[in-house]
Amino acid sequence: MGTPKLKYCGMTSLRDFQVASQSKADYIGFIFAESKRKVLPQDVKGWIDHTDPAGKKLVGIFVNESVPSIVQTAAESSLDVIQLHGDETVSEITELKKQLSPEKKIWKALHHNDKTLQLMETYSPAVDGFVIDTFSKKQRGGTGESFPWEYIPSYTKAAIEAGKDCFIAGGISAENVEDLMKWKPSGVDLSSGIEENGRKSSALIKMLEERMFHHE
């Protein structure tokens, strides 16, 4: 199975970005959609100018954003991955892919429910990966709640068979990451689970990474 990929999401300041850049994360995420963690492309560009992300890939989160807007933000913020959290259709994603430079990847966020595996199959031809999160009527992502983890192996298997990345999100923290590892996720995505008072915490990150990687 190998080591799961690690993504820290929802950077809101240069300090957050610096903390994440010094971590073991493979990906650092920024939210460009309406959210308490929303940032602007010029913010991200400024942070990158001040801090070397140390080879980590940068991910931008969008919700029902227009294709030209995503393409512009991806260029301005040096994004490697576009993560879509809205009602984007396969044809819209295909159109977006045509307009992005070929090395940029697209991930589709899906909520855990009885249709998730079917949706993975539907979106598979258009995307490079999936982020499986918990459904909330109040918000599209970042709920801080987890879904039943016994479903993880079926999502991971479907993604691997399709040659796609697959990240598990929602309610993950240093407290429960060892339980999560028992389900062998291929990717792990955290935001609030590594925060203290709304800021990314190097102490929580260190604790999480020690617990996540100690059994290798």
Image (tube, helix red, strand yellow):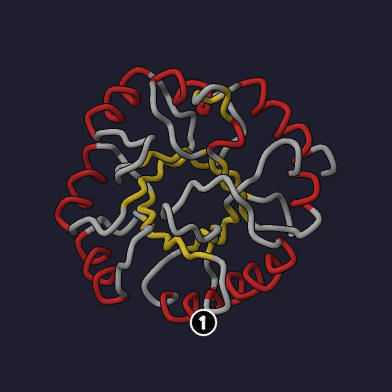
List the residue tagged with mark 1: 118
Residue found at the very far front of the displayed protein = 138
Q: Which residue is painted at 71% across and 61% down in the image?
A: 149
Near-viewer residue (22 or 193): 193
Residue 132 at x, y percent in the picture = 54, 61
Q: Which residue is painted at 44% across and 59% down in the image?
A: 137
Near-viewer residue (199 or 45): 199
Callout 1: helix, strand or loop?
helix
Residue 1 position (above or below residue 59)? below
Q: Which residue is painted at 58% across and 78% down in the image?
A: 114
Tell me: 175 left or right of 62. Answer: right
Residue 144 at x, y percent in the picture = 57, 45
Q: Quadrant of the N terminus?
A: bottom right
Q: Residues within 10 Å of mark 1 (few under 14, many from 20)?
A: few
Residue 13 at x, y percent in the picture = 39, 23
Residue found at the very far right of the displayed protein = 215
